[in-house]
Image (cartoon, rainbow, N blue to C red):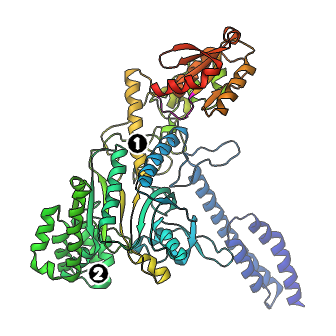
Amino acid sequence: MQVVRCRQLARVVFSNNITSTFCRTRTRYRDSWLGDQKRDIFVESPTMEATALSIQERLKAKQAEVAALEKELLDSTKKERKDKKADKSGYLLKTPKGTRDYGPKQMAIRKSVFKKIEAVFTNHGAVNIDTPTFELKEILTGKYGEDAKLIYDLADQAGELCSLRYDLTVPFARYVAMTSLSKIKRYQIAKVYRRDKPRMTKGRYREFYQCDFDIAGDYDPMIADTEVLRIVYEIISGLDLGEFVIKVNHRKILDGIFELCGVPKKLFRGACACVDKLDKLPWEDVRKEMVEEKGLKPEAADKVGEYVLLKGGDDLLEKLKANEKFIKNKSARLGIQDMELLFTYIKMFNIADRISFDLSLARGLDYYTGLIYECVLTDDMALLDDVPFLDDLPETPAAAADAPAAAATADAPAAAATATAPEASSEGAAATPESAVADKKDGAAEESGEAAAAVAAVPVEGVPVGVGSIAGGGRYDELVGMYSGRKVPCVGVSIGIERVFSILEAREYRKLKEAKAKGEQYVIKKRETEVYVASAEKNMAGHRIGLCTMLWDAGVKTEVSYNKNPKMLNQMQYCEAEGIPLAIIIGSRELANDEVSLRVVATREQVAVKKGDIVAAIREQLAKL
């Protein structure tokens, strides 16, 4: 009887105290603890009073624990929202770390860069393919060495374990294996995903584009490899990024060095990953990591250092060939033979002045088997310390109008984009974008948008906007065979396009700043509009729309105001602010003569053109500009 009454009391206690308390808790602790109590409570006690007392004591302890958890959760939420902008609905409006939005100015730059890169790829005879954004996890496993921890794994999808692609090379190898291809020259421009520590101004993101070019097939040694180097040369030169050097090395040479220095074969890849950090860390730090973390003997690490710090050109090649001990090593000798061919071909491809033989280049990915290379800018890129993203820069009302309707109704004069202070954003007002500096915490102190716009901000100069290598790749002869058992040698390169964008954005920001200082206009053209149809009189909407429709049918990129009676001044200011080169002006006089006025916006020169000749006149005028 006591047991039954004890159970009844326990249920009442749970109903009135435990359930109501834990239902308010937003942690997984609730359900697990409650389940334990339900199992433990139905025990026979000597007396009902003792059981009730025990329940009450346990309730107090757990209620205190729950209160602490709730406070911790609340503090965590407050901390996350601290110095961040939330709209009236309470949502925290920001993109995930390592990602960003791209506004019209940025997309204009990106589109132009993609077009130039794709032109180089197609000039060399490449075909375009596309692969899924995610792959089966087993396809990606074991291909990236220490970087495998950066792969994004997805939740189980109907029995398939998948991961977001880490690069475009492994999916390409899987594609070649699946389709039983023996030869293909392909390019692919697509997004990849890495759980990396983001550095936004250095072009390091968690979601970013790669531009890959690969040649698959069994060909004579080093010819395809050298063409890939030529492609890197053409792309970087064409983008006008400044002086650069293409560093080259060979995985077999590195393996030969490790053998000669007494590094156990099982430690080769770990040692290789350490050597790959020499472009970022001094040798002392790299040596320490080799010994303390990778397990190399100190004397072996010292011997490795004697080799990997060497760099040069033909002279280094001759020096290694003269090293009798080095050249006797089979792996090193095979690597040297390839490098001799390479130095012959780079002269034929006319890129010898851009090549540096650098033994510190290692490329940490496991699938490389032969030649490896990276392209690095050598110009001083110390442009600006704090470089706001271009679309964070505020503009005057008319210039900021994305739609012609906005321009048509604006009363204030329009101006081109100028280097004014960046508005306060969720990452901090007038501050370095998120993760631009390693020790900066999320959420710098906010300023109001009005205060920020009132100050002509000039970022502090003198701190490099460094981006590291902007292209890299190599030969991977065994990757396709891992999937198909068929050996299909491959060589390729990936352009670090986001790093290129970071450089170009910094350059555009500097131009905006210089224009601001001179009191000049500087327009980053966001649209491809060729002509704007305007009117200086009222009740011309039908005529403007009819003319605009005719130009669209003829393939002319045309805009028109969405207002019935827009002001002429606002229409012309919109053209100036958006970089629209031509304007067609119609009025009652033009209609009476069956003609239009064609104006060059920059010079304000205009001529009368018969309506039937307008398309030809536009083409002719655009060719002159």
Instruction: Report whether 446 appears left or right of 339.
Output: right
Magenta-highlighted residues = 523-530
Q: Residue 295 carries which label?
A: 2
Name the residue type under label 1: Leu
Residue plotted at (44% across, 30% down):
419
* Residue 301 lies in quadrant: bottom left
Vertical placement of 266 versus 618: above or below? below
Residue situated in front as seen by the camera: 521 or 63: 521
| 458 on left or right of 603 | left
Quick one: which residue is furthest to the right in this view?
A: 1
Q: In which quadrant will I find the N terminus?
A: bottom right
Q: Where is residue 292 in the image (x, y as percent from the top left)?
A: 28, 76
Number of numbered discs visible in the structure rendering: 2
Taking 396 as reference, is 126 left or right? Answer: left
Q: What residue type is labelled 2?
A: Gly
Is residue 259 in view from this perspective?
yes
Report x, y in % for residue 498.
Answer: 44, 51
Residue 161 sits inside the magenta stretch: no
Q: Residue 48 location in percent, x, y?
A: 83, 85
The stretch drawn in magenta includes residue 528:
yes
Q: Mark 1 points at which residue?
A: 504
Cα distance between the residues tagged 1 and 2: 42 Å
Q: Residues within 10 Å of mark 1 (few under 14, many from 20)?
A: some
If you read the primary sequence from the N terminus, does the residue marked by circle 1 or circle 2 appear first? 2
Dominant secondary-structure state across the stretch colored magenta: loop
**In the drawing, does residue 379 fall left or right of residue 530?**
left
Q: Residues within 10 Å of mark 2 (few under 14, many from 20)?
A: some
Q: Nearer the viewer, residue 424 or 365?
A: 365
Question: In the structure shown, which secondary structural element does the residue marked by tag 1 occupy?
Answer: helix
Say if 369 sits above or below 193 in the image: below
Q: What element carries label 2?
A: loop
